[in-house]
Amino acid sequence: MFFRRSIFVKLLSWFFLNLIFLGLILTLFFQIQFYVSPDSFLRLHAEKETASLRHLIRHELTRLPRDQWDELLSRYGQAFSVELSLFTPSGHELAGNIGDLPPEVLSEIKVRARKRGPRSERGRWREARQGRQSFPAHQLPERRIFRVRSLNPTRYWLGVPVPILNSDGSGFVPAILIAATDSLFASALYPNPMPWLVGALLIVLFSLLWWWPMVRHITRPLREMNRATEEIARGDLKVQLDEKRIDEIGCLGRSINHMALRLDGFITGQKRFLSDVAHELCSPLARLRMGLAVLEKRLDSGQQEGFADVEEEADEIAELVDEILAFSRAELRPEAVTLAVVPIVEIVNRALEREKWARNRFKLSLEKDLTVKANTELLLRALVNLLRNALRYGDPDSLVDITAVRRENEVVLEVRDYGPGVPEAELECIFEPFYRLEPDRNRKSGGSGLGLAIVKTCVEASHGKVRARNLEPSGLSVTIELPAD
């Protein structure tokens, strides 16, 4: 999942996939150069070493007796880090200690023996191989160097034509010098990939140093933008991104800054409007309720029932205005809130006493001496609204659970009711202002949609977090997480 979301990882992965592809090309290149023509520039160094060995062996074989050939091949084999043997074109070992040749090498020798030149010279070639005829040096049929790789075990073989002086000195007969090794790196007779590997390593290091600043240059501002948008989603609109860049990322940063500024203006205006309307409604609403109280005393018993409905509507309007005022006061910036050490047990007791709720409606499970860093009034207001919400929508035959525990560096205060709960798709929406579930939680059942919004703003103003989840088989759990003292 992290791979799919991170551009930084994607770019680096693409870079290393490119390197893997380059490595495969180099490997294929090494394999190809093992089979390319001897005069190719890819094998120039190896061919020079092979020509030197061929010249030395040919010279020594000419002047030494046959019983010293084994020692000669052993000495040169150690010098060139290979095993050397001398074979006839038919595959018979004349000198050396390699022994039997693998089928791949024998097959290559036979194939090349058939490709020996004009048809008129085939008889002379056959006689020379059988030792019945020799050639002058300039008339020897041309035979080229070959390289073969055998399997089980893997070994690398080199075949070099070396004319041998006939025993009577009358001419030369063809022979093949076979060199064998277990590794391409062991001898200079084979194409050495080490310089290419060193070059490839330098390319990799240079590419990494070249790519790293560019990748960081792209991904660092994107991480900052992601952080800024998350803060905007949490309601913190005072974000500010760097606007010095002139590329597309800089344009996106300026757009985010402009968006945050406009949203802050809209939300501030909305809050000011709500607060002003609530304050303006307070005075006429107070006069209205006072007038209703006076009017109630003058009504006869037959008019009291209809008047009660009017008075109830006036009380609902007053409650709504009070909630709007509470919400506007709760919408404080965290930096403007004074935090103090607040005991959890004390704040729960104050909430129950303030609302005069019966304690037998609650089940308390609070750790002793548990304290948090929060604003006392905001935390009290949040807890009161949370408990009021649990009593209103919970099962009237069940208790409301209040628990508080410490988890590492924070305290988790949880309130559980055992009502119908909330649809999963709307759990994140219930903390939005004026959000109500229809038809389960409408004005008839009470609630203006501001209770949980007040809880959220009060908790976040105290540098905390609030979450909601459904319980099984029914119920709703709301947790408040605050820094522990």
Image (spheres, grey):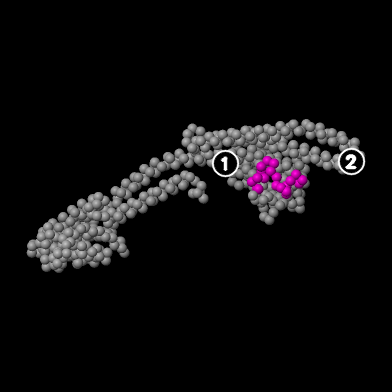
Q: Position of residue 87 (x, y in %)?
A: 19, 64
Q: Disc 2, disc 1: CB below 8 Å?
A: no
Residue at horizontal 71 percent and vertical 47 percent from the top: 438
- Depth order, front residue of 194/169: 169
The percent coordinates of residue 321 (x first, y second) are: 74, 36
Q: Position of residue 86 (x, y in %)?
A: 18, 62
Is 338 included in the stretch rendered in magenta? no
- Crowd tier of the residue under label 2, counting other residues whose Cα lies within 10 Å: few below 14, some 14–19, many 20 or above: few
Q: Which residue is mark 2?
A: 303
First-in-chain label (2 vs 1): 1
The amino acid sitting under disc 1 is: Glu
Tag nearer the camera, 2 or 1: 2
Q: Nearer the viewer, residue 462 or 306?
A: 306
Q: How many marks?
A: 2
Q: Quadrant of residue 176?
A: bottom left
Magenta-highlighted residues: 426-445
**Can I make out residue 400 in this image?**
no
Residue at point 43%, 40% (across, down): 214
Decide if residue 81 is on the left or right side of residue 7.
left
* Label 2: element kind: helix
Query: Does residue 19 sit above or below 277 in this rendering?
Result: below
Q: Quadrant of residue 314?
A: top right
Q: Which mark is residue 60?
A: none
**Is residue 430 one of those drawn in magenta?**
yes
Q: Which residue is mark 1?
A: 230
Q: Residue at x 10, y 61 (%)?
A: 171
**117 or 157, which lies in front?**
117
Q: Quadrant of the C terminus?
A: top right
The relative height of residue 150 versus residue 474 in the rendered view (above or below) is below
Three-letter residue code for mark 2: Gln
Up-down relation of residue 168 to residue 40 (above or below): below
- x 69%, y 35%: residue: 328
